[in-house]
Image (spheres, rainbow, N blue to C red):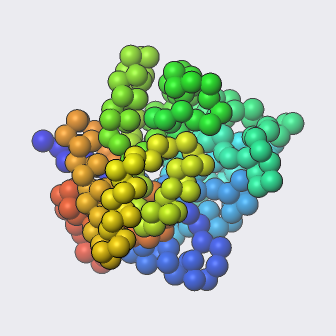
Amino acid sequence: MTRAQVSFEVFPPQTFDASLRLWQAVQALSPLSPDFVSVTYGAGGGTRSQTQETLVTLQRTYGVEVAAHLTCVGATRAQTLQTAAAFAALGVRQIVALRGDAPQGSARFTPHPDGFGDTVELVAALAKTGLFTLRVAAYPERHPDAPNAQADVDWLKRKIDAGASSAITQFFFKADIFLRFRDACAKAGITAPVIPGILPIQSWAGAKRFAARCGALVPQRLDEGFTAAARDGRERLFALTQCATLCERLLAEGVGQLHFYTLNCADLTRDVVRALGLTSELTPQLAQSRVA
């Protein structure tokens, strides 16, 4: 039986201390042989230079396959495609194409007058270049801008039909939420892989804030469990158990890849991957030798 693959998301650092945290995380995660590591991209290209530097370092120093996030926010079509061309010039061959969140201070996403109006347009334009493998986002729980759950499935199908080869979901806390979404995607004729996005919970308060912003259901039993664990000083053990149990259920249901939102913190993600037995772990020296 083929072992499931793992992939990770990181974000580019904007301070010296953040840079240290990122590279400590990458040193811990790269020996796990990820399928790819995705690097986020700030609204309006706010972290463009840091994103490019992070991509280059991941490729050249750690020898990992990278996927660059690219959004529609705050840029013309020409500027967005120029950014994509710059990624290609760096050797990047994967893009996670996203609409992007509304800029800070704005209630809703508004396209640039000369920009891409949505992700379908962005994916179609990138697909025409023939330069990239394209991944997109998927929402197993209703996106805040979607009128209903079926609209999320229909919109994902449009993105796949426009040229995306796979999708990565927003995080969720119950396996059944993803499994029902996967069934709905199959019923709609989506055959591309839908990869579950997993959030190892570094901070329960922070995870609840993230969930509120993206509309993810917070199960009462999980909230009660973290509250009890905090009283006993067992938050990390509970978080590890919760995440590993969620992933085990997904793997048992035939999921072939897990994408971890690391928040640039490696320890919990690494321990979950090890607990699941999803690594033939390389030493850091051997991992780096792959680029020699």
Q: Nearer the viewer, residue 91 or 212?
A: 212
Residue 11's quadrant in the figure?
bottom right
Question: x, y (%) of residue 13?
Answer: 60, 72
Residue 276's quadrant in the figure?
bottom left
Q: Nearer the viewer, residue 233 or 275?
A: 233
Question: x, y (%) of residue 99?
Answer: 66, 40
Split into 4 quadrants, where in the image is the N terminus? Answer: top left
Looking at this view, name the residue that lies furthest to the right. Answer: 113
Left or right, 195 with respect to 275, comes to: right
- Report whether residue 157 is seen: no
Does residue 234 lie above or below 252 as drawn?
below
Does residue 155 lie above or below 166 as drawn?
above
Left or right, 249 with respect to 131, comes to: left
Question: x, y (%) of residue 167?
Answer: 46, 37
Split into 4 quadrants, where in the image is the C terminus? Answer: bottom left
Left or right, 144 with respect to 4, comes to: right
- Report whether residue 271 is seen: yes
For the image shown, how many numbered marks are present on the structure? 0
Q: Residue at x 73, y 60 (%)?
A: 46
Q: Residue at x 75, y 35 (%)?
A: 116
Does residue 116 lie above or below 246 as drawn?
above
Q: Residue at x 54, y 33 (%)?
A: 142
Residue 179's quadrant in the figure?
top left
Q: Nearer the viewer, residue 114 or 267?
A: 267
Question: x, y (%) of residue 244?
Answer: 26, 56
Q: Residue at x 33, y 65 (%)?
A: 228
Q: Nearer the viewer, residue 86 or 73?
A: 73
